[in-house]
Each structure stands twice: as C-alpha cells, then as structure tokens.
Image (cartoon, grey):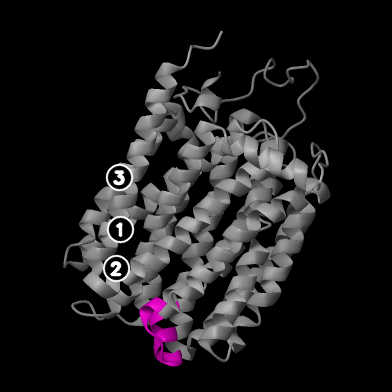
C-alpha cells in the first residue's frame, strides 16, 4: 500500500515541476489534468477561492455578532450560538446527499446551484423576526451550502494532477479563511454603526458577487464521469470509505480540529466584550483579521507535508493550536491575540492536510469520501460552538479552552495510532 493510502510520510514537494514521465497517466496516455502554470489553473484557483470566501462568509455570518443578537432578541449565549450551530449542522446533515447529486449531475452544476440558493437565503436572514426564525433560516442556508465543499474537493481531485493537489486544496481552504475573516470584519464594523441585521445583509451582497464570479471563472470539468444515484450504490460507497481505517482517522481529525475552532470563535466575542477588555463590536470584528494567518498556513500546507510528512504536519498543527489555547488564557490582550494567531494557523494547516489526504486516499466515490470528511468536520463545528458556549457560561474562558485542549489530545492520539498502523503494514513492492 502506498504512502498516500496509508497516511505514511512522504517526501514529495507539492510545488515541484511535473516531469515528462509524470505528464502521462498510468495507461500511457497524455495527462490533461491541470497543473500550476498550466491552462485554466489560475481561473480554477480563483473561482474556487471565491467559492470558499462566499461559503465561510455566509456560514459564519452571525458568529461575530452573537452578543448583539443576544441583546436584540433577548436570548442567552447558548441560544444565540444556535445561529451558528444550525448552519453548520445543516451542512453536516446534507453534505452526503448533495455529494451524491454531484456524482450524477456534475461538480460544477451542483456547486453553482448550492451557492445560488445559499445566497438567496442569505438575503432573507436580515428580516428574521425572532430567534426561532433566524435559526431556521440559518439551518436552510447551511443545508444549501452543503453542495459546495465536498464537490469542490472532488472537482480538484479529478481535474488537478496529484502532485499539485495539496496546494490546490490549500488554496480553496485559504479562500475559506479569507471568507471567515472578511465576513467577521465587515459585520463587526457595519454592526457597530447600523446593527447586526444590516451586517448580515451586506455579507449576502458580497456573496452574490462571489457567486457570479465563481460561475464565470470555473472551467468546465474534463475528467468527470457521471455515477449512479441508486441508494444501494451510494450506501456501498459510503460503507467502503467508513471501512478504511485511514479515512476514519482523517474524519475524526477534521472533526476534532473544528471542535476547537468552532468553540473558540463562537465564544471569543463574549469574552472580549466583557471585563477586563470591554472592546467595542468593530474592534472585535477586526480581531478576525488573524484569519489571514490561516490563509498563509493553509496555502503552504503542501510544502509543509513535503518537508515533514503528513503525520509530522498534523503533529505541528496540533501543537501550534494547543500552544495558542494556553496563551489565550492570559489576561493580557496582546497575549490573547497571539493565542488566536496560533490557534488559527494550527487549525487551517491541520484542516488542509487532513482534507487533501482524504482526496488522495479515496480511489473511487471521491465526492462521498470528501462529503464524509465535511460532515464530520461540520459536526465538529456544531459541537464546538455549542459545547464551547455552554462551557463558557459555566466556567468562563478556561472552560472553553479545556474543551479545545481535550480535542487536540484526541488529534495527537489518533495520529499516533496512524503511525503505529503504518509501521505494522508491509512495505510497498
């Protein structure tokens, strides 16, 4: 079994040039898949980058606004956090069915429809009259967005050469970080002036622009082969993926990393508006500029894997995240911000490494393999945002940090198990 399928460390430079031998498939035919610098690669990268921006901007549009939503609708932090958990939960529940549609109707078609519906719902969110209506709209929005993440990764796995896959997925993840950052910064300042409803409306308009540009830029797929929508075939594919020990480990790692991230960024607004910081909403929104660190760490994940291997990269990502959690316990604002920087860098690096490993490991049903990862990932987000808020209400910021550290211990333990499993397997012939 190859390193890619076992999770063993590799020494491949993700950005290395493709040789003449590598430009042909195993069958000896010319490999027409995209590669950095080749035709269509920049358009594809920009299109999926913008899709990532829109996805995260919409998905987490209420996260930085939770204190304002609590005040406006008269609800506690735990209730307000459901505006985040409902969106990520809806995505987690619908990502597998939407991936099946992408196997039948095509990645680009499903991504376009998914983003269009999510944008339309986003324009309705500002008019929600109650917390119940707001949570319901957010759940529908998350379900609509479910067609995008898994389909995007499957599109990349089919249309990009394997040596460039980690870098390509890293760019998509980087778009997620930019979307998460820009959405929170915009909503923070707009909300300070005009309230949270105008803020989420502005995000909806930004997403409209991203959706239009995405559809115009994304190259038509050249290597997609339509699959079956029969439930028996779908269930068989899902069973195959869940029976793969490496894929199970990667799904758990994605969920645990997102548990940390969802908990920290759901609660951080409450912490920074309270004593001893007392920051205004606009400044709190600007703190999400640390997402730019995630943009860098995600886009360079391919080079990190090339230097230290996949498991080494996961250890570094987990250690960086844990160090950030511990630093964030300080009562000094600069140290809290440094902690957020480390948490963000570690999370996005770990997510890029794990998600690209899923795409490389699956030999069939790639959309379903990616969908299962995304489902686990967003279940982690829902759990993290809810449990993190409950822990904060009970024990303050230290409770939220405790939840995050517990999740990182899980990441390290699973990676150690993967290392032991790889050593037990025979070397490839």
Report the magenta stretch's main SS: helix
Q: Circle 3: is it few (<14), some (14-19), or many (20+) Cα within 10 Å?
A: some
Q: Position of residue 23 (x, y in %)?
A: 71, 21
* Image quarter of the C terminus: top right
* Image quarter of the N terminus: top right
Residue at point 66%, 56% (across, down):
148
Compared to residue 271, the image places residue 295 above or below, namely above
Task: Please tell me whether mark 3 sits on a helix, a strand or a loop.
Answer: helix
Q: Is 125 left or right of 67, judged from the image as shown?
A: right
Q: CA distance from mark 1 to mark 3?
A: 10 Å
Residue at point 27%, 60% (across, down):
401
Task: Please tell me whether mark 2 sits on a helix, a strand or a loop.
Answer: helix
Nearer to us in this view, 352 or 167: 352
Q: Position of residue 378 (x, y in %)?
A: 52, 57
| CB contact under 8 Å: marks 1 and 2 | yes
The residue that label 3 is drawn on is 409
Q: Position of residue 90 (x, y in %)?
A: 59, 65
Compared to residue 73, the image places residue 184 above or below, namely above
Q: Position of residue 24 (x, y in %)?
A: 74, 19
The residue that label 1 is drawn on is 403
Residue at point 54%, 64% (across, down):
89
Identify the disc placed on residue 391: 2
Q: Residue 115: say if magenta.
A: no
Outermost residue on the front side: it is 232
Q: Which stretch is magenta?
A: 65-78
């Amino acid at each position: 079994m190859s390193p890619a399928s076992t999770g063993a460390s590799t020494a491949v430079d993700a950005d290395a040039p493709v040789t003449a031998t590598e430009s042909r498939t195993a069958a000896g035919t010319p490999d027409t898949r995209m590669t950095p610098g080749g035709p269509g690669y920049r358009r594809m990268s920009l299109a999926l980058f913008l899709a990532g921006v829109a996805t995260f901007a919409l998905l987490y549009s209420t996260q930085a606004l939770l204190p304002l939503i609590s005040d406006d609708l008269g609800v506690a932090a735990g209730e307000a956090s459901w505006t985040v958990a409902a969106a990520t939960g809806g995505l987690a529940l619908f990502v597998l069915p939407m991936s099946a549609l992408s196997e039948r109707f095509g990645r680009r078609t499903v991504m376009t429809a998914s983003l269009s519906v999510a944008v339309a719902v986003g324009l309705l969110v500002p008019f929600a009259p109650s917390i119940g209506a707001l949570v319901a709209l957010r759940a529908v929005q998350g379900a609509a967005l479910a067609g995008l993440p898994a389909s995007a990764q499957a599109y990349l796995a089919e249309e990009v050469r394997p040596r460039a896959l980690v870098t390509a997925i890293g760019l998509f993840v980087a778009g997620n970080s930019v979307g998460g950052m820009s959405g929170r910064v915009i909503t923070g300042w707009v909300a300070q002036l005009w309230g949270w409803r105008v803020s989420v409306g502005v995000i909806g308009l930004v997403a409209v622009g991203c959706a239009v540009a995405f559809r115009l830029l994304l190259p038509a797929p050249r290597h997609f082969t339509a699959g079956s929508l029969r439930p028996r075939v779908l269930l068989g594919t899902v069973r195959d993926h869940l029976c793969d020990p490496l894929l199970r480990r990667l799904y758990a790692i994605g969920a645990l990393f997102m548990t940390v991230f969802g908990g920290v960024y759901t609660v951080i607004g409450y912490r920074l508006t309270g004593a001893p910081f007392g920051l205004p909403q606009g400044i709190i929104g600007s703190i999400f500029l640390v997402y730019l660190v995630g943009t860098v760490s995600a886009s360079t994940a391919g080079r990190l894997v090339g230097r230290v291997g996949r498991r080494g990269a996961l250890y570094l990502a987990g250690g960086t995240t844990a160090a950030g959690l511990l630093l964030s316990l300080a009562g000094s604002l600069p140290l809290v911000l440094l902690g957020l920087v480390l948490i963000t860098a570690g999370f996005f690096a770990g997510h890029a490494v794990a998600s690209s490993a899923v795409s490389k490991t699956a030999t069939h049903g790639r959309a379903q393999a990616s969908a299962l990862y995304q489902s686990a990932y967003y279940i982690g987000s829902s759990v993290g945002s809810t449990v993190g808020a409950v822990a904060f209400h009970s024990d303050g910021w230290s409770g939220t940090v405790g939840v995050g550290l517990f999740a990182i211990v899980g990441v390290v333990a699973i990676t150690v198990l993967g290392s032991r499993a790889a050593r037990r397997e025979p070397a490839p012939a």
